[in-house]
Amino acid sequence: MSFWDAGLPQLMNEALVPGASLAIIRGGRIAEVVSCGVRHSRSPLSVDENTVFDAASLSKPIFAQVVLQLVDQGQLTLDTLLVDQLAGYIANDPRASSISVAHALSHSSGLPNWRTLEHPLRTYFSPGERFSYSGEGFLYLQRVVEAVTGEPLEGLAQKLVFEPLGMTRSSFVWERRFEANRAYGHDVFGTPALGNKPGEANAAWSLQTCAVDYARFLIGALAGTRLRPATTQLALAPRIQVKHRGIESLGLSPEVATTGVAWGLGWGLEPAANTFFHWDANGPFTAFTIGSLQDRSAFVIFTNGASGLSIMPEIVAHFSSGERPSLVWLDFIPHEAPARRLFRAALARGTEAAWPEIESAALQRNELIWIARGLNALGRERESLWLRERAGTK
């Protein structure tokens, strides 16, 4: 029995991930599609290869493909300054006037990931100075693309990517036809969570798709479909090195680290392995994709659980052996972390029975509270209260 038949369901059960769908590409073709689990934890409906997931950040490479085709068509260049095409988008920030198309696609625009009260929309370092993951940069570029072409992103994506690649179950906006076979999101404890039905396209996160469709996109990326060869090479060439832990770096003096990760145009890169990757950590949905232009191989997995990334290293290892700098850099909390392991012990044996093991692990107070929250979420209120008393948080 293969890992996909036995090992994957076991990992998903341990991580409280209800469902997953994945596709493996070898030699530029889909070699295997695996679907596992259910679309909703309170329903027997199974995930299959056509189940539509919220792809979240896996939107970004597809949007990058749209932009690069426009570059090949001469409607933009990588050096085009966004302010020249859309003035006034970022007010009272002279540094923002130097943000280019390439800066936005390589997450070196200087903008925050998303604007907040703590980090309003402005640049936090000079564009091109360093990497800092930015959904805002992609949204800014989306508005520029729509201004230049006079078309909304959804229409452009359908015309330039989805239709040519046969991605019939993909869209940047929600479509009613997806309802019959959609995945529902779940929190870290495997309980149903609110999902998205985006009514407006967002280049950074609104993609709805299935594993087979995204595999078709990956095949196109491996083949350089609809792009000039030189443009494909540029997209997958290191444009900026990632020299810090964590995806954002907005402070004045970021701590320098060796990560083995760089960024191209829409893709994260592992230069030493000559591979490209991206991930999605959008709350109740998680995903990961990685590929090798040299081997013409790729892998993508979508899950409908917020804990999906906790088992990603084990899953990816069954597609490609060797060190994965991307996964080390992303630093997902593993499903075998003490708090997660002891939470499972409490579920299996009862909290009081598992308490000696929990107590001896010397967990932090916040970890005990996390376990108590999970017990409460799964209807174990009495045990949750009992543990909170032990943690001194009643």
Image (cartoon, rainbow, N blue to C red):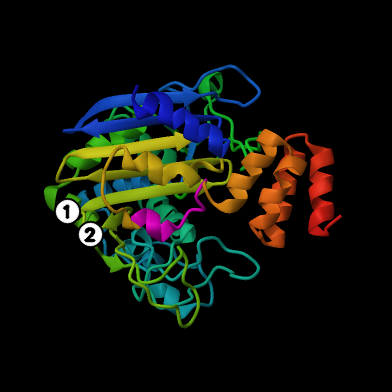
Amino acid at pointer 1: Gln
Residue placed under numbered mark 1 in the picture: 233
| Residue 86 vs residue 309, the one in the foreground | 309
In which quarter of the view is residue 390 placed? bottom right
Percent x, y of residue 264: 28, 58
Camera sees residue 168: no
Amino acid at pointer 2: Pro
Say which mark, if any, is on residue 316: none
For the point 41% across and 48% down, the residue is 279
Q: Secondary structure at mark 1?
A: helix
In which quarter of the view is residue 22 placed? top left
For the point 66% across and 38% down, the residue is 194
Percent x, y of residue 343: 65, 44
Left or right, 95 with reference to 232: right
Residue 343's place in the image compared with 273, above or below, is above
Left or right, 360 with reference to 269: right
Residue placed under numbered mark 2 in the picture: 271
Q: Secondary structure at mark 2?
A: loop
For the point 69% across and 35% down, the residue is 349
In the current view of this chain or complex, which residue is farthest to the right? 394
Left or right, 254 with reference to 32: right
Q: Quadrant of the N terminus?
A: top left
Residue 390 covered by magenta stretch = no
Residue numbers of the magenta segment? 326-335
